[in-house]
Amino acid sequence: MRAYLIDELSSRDMAKVEDFLGQHAVPSALDGIYWGRVSEDLLSEQQYAHRGCRPHVFAIETGEDWIKLEFFLRSLADMRCPCAGYATRAQRDFIIRFAHGMIQDLDLHT
């Protein structure tokens, strides 16, 4: 899986991350997994055409001292739909900006 990893975070920073994700991402049924929504204006042609698959999201996983943001977009409505796939350049940039914004907003020490 292609992903962006932020590691070696303190337990204090991880608590801030969990709070942030609770407000800015969709929690999943699994502990430590969140869904980051991708802006509709960044969807590929196929993703945009699949209105029933919206929102398209990327996975954010948290561990003891790390955060991983996956560069794979999927639908929460249909995990097997062909509109799921690796992020385009614009979508990847969006995910990286999300990560960097979180680091800056929370003053994380990496």
Image (tube, helix red, strand yellow):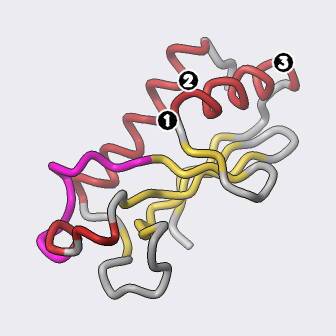
Q: Residue 29 at what x, y percent from top left?
A: 73, 58
Q: Is residue 57 above or below residue 51?
A: above
Q: Is residue 43 magenta?
A: yes
Residue type at mark 3? Arg
The numbered dot on residue 103 is 2
Q: Residue 110 at what x, y percent from top left?
A: 67, 26
Q: Is residue 13 above or below residue 91?
A: above
The numbered dot on residue 109 is none
- Cα distance, mark 2 to mark 3? 13 Å
- Cα distance, mark 1 to mark 2? 6 Å
Residue at the image position 47 percent from the left and 57 percent from the top? 58
The answer to which of 36 and 12 lies nearer the viewer is 36
Q: Earlier in the sequence, mark 3 or mark 1?
A: 3
Residue type at mark 2? Ile
Q: Is residue 66 left or right of residue 59?
A: right
Q: Is residue 14 left or right of residue 4?
A: right
Q: Is residue 53 left or right of residue 65?
A: left
Magenta residues, as a range? 37-46
Residue at the image position 37 percent from the left and 60 percent from the top? 56
The numbered dot on residue 99 is 1
